[in-house]
Image (tube, rainbow, N blue to C red):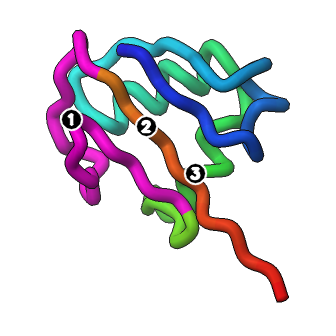
Amino acid sequence: MKILIPSALHSYTGGARAEADGATLAEVLTDLDRRHPGVRFRMIDEQGRIRRHIRFFAGGVQVFDLGQALDPAGELIIVQALSGG
């Protein structure tokens, strides 16, 4: 699966695009972390939940559940909210 990485995580993946395998969001993120150690922790907290500032989109639809099945031939877009003042 092709993955579009937000700029804040480029230091982990080396750029805006990455690839990972898996049938569910959880499996894709686990494989992404195997290929790019440390990146999963920036998106998933210690309780195994998606962090509040991270959004995942597959096929143009937001994915809320780590168990959600994904199309291996599709694209996953990861969006990280920005904040400031």
Secondary element type, mark 3: loop
Mark 1 neighbour class, 10 Å CA radius: few under 14, some 14 to 19, many 20 or more? few
Q: Which of marks 3 and 2 is in front?
A: 2
Which residue is located at x 22 percent, y 22 percent?
Answer: 23
From the image, tell me which residue sits under label 1.
59
- The secondary structure that dominates the magenta segment is loop
Image spot of residue 76 (x, y percent): 37, 31
Quadrant position of the C terminus in the picture: bottom right
Look at the image and say whether residue 70 sits in the magenta stretch: yes
Image quadrant assignment for residue 15: top right
Report, in whole angstroms, how far the alpha carbon at label 1 lies from the one at label 3: 19 Å
Secondary element type, mark 1: loop
For this rendering, which residue is in front, 7 or 28?
7
* CB-based contact (under 8 Å), mark 3 and mark 2: no
In the rendered structure, which segment of residues is drawn in magenta? 54-74
Which residue type does callout 2 highlight? Ile
Image spot of residue 45 (x, y percent): 57, 60
From what the image shows, is residue 46 above or below residue 5?
A: below
* CB-based contact (under 8 Å), mark 1 and mark 3: no
From the image, tell me which residue sits under label 2.
77
Image spot of residue 56 (x, y percent): 39, 48
Report, in whole angstroms, how far the alpha carbon at label 3 lies from the one at label 2: 13 Å
From what the image shows, is residue 70 above or below residue 7?
A: above
Report, in whole angstroms, how far the alpha carbon at label 1 lies from the one at label 2: 9 Å
* CB-based contact (under 8 Å), mark 1 and mark 2: no
Which residue is located at x 59 percent, y 56 percent?
Answer: 80
Which residue type does callout 1 highlight? Gly
Image quadrant assignment for residue 22: top left
Which numbered disc flags the more N-terminal residue, 1 or 2? 1
From the image, tell me which residue sits under label 3.
43
Which residue type does callout 3 highlight? Met
